[in-house]
Amino acid sequence: MEKNDAMKELYWECNYNLAYCIYQEAKILKNPESQKKGIERAAGIILEARRSRFGTPTQAARFNELLNTPKYADLKAALDRLDGGSVPSGKSP
């Protein structure tokens, strides 16, 4: 069981890091359309994670901190657009 919990934590940590890195890469792109697509791709990963309650409490806290940081307002806005704004952060549909 311990090993499974560790793997679950690692899986959700990787999802967080993937979304964060895609977002960071998008922010350095010069083409606004490419930047928008990258941010939406990161938001899509976060949306899938949100639907699973971000996997673990530790990772839920990380995702929610990211989404509630003003610096990442464009990411949160993209997430809300993809989700239709119907599900608050950290909540399951």
Image (tube, rainbow, N blue to C red):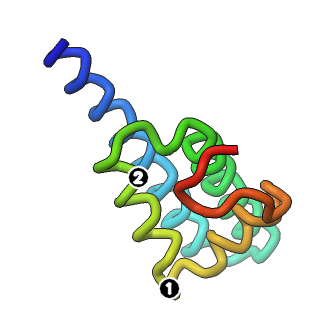
- Say if 15 sits above or below 84 in the image: above
CA–CA distance between discs 2 and 1?
Answer: 18 Å
Indicate left or right for 36 with 89 as reference: right
Question: N-terminal of the two: label 2 or label 1?
Answer: 2
Hey, which residue is sitting farthest bottom in the picture? 70
Amino acid at dot 2: Ala
Residue that carries the numbered disc 2 in the rendered image: 60
Q: Which residue is rendered at x = 46% and y = 64% of the image?
A: 64
Please provide percent x and percent y for residue 87: 71, 57
Hey, which residue is sitting farthest left in the picture? 2
| Mark 1, secondary structure of its residue | helix
Indicate left or right for 41 with 46 as reference: right
Disc number placed over residue 71 in the picture, else none: 1
Q: Residues within 10 Å of mark 1 (few under 14, many from 20)?
A: few
Query: Where is the N terminus found, in terms of image quarters?
Result: top left
Q: Which residue is rendered at x = 28% and y = 33% of the image?
A: 10
Query: Where is the C terminus found, in terms of image quarters?
Result: top right
Please provide percent x and percent y for residue 67: 52, 70
Amino acid at dot 1: Lys
Q: Which residue is rendered at x = 60% and y = 66% of the image?
A: 26
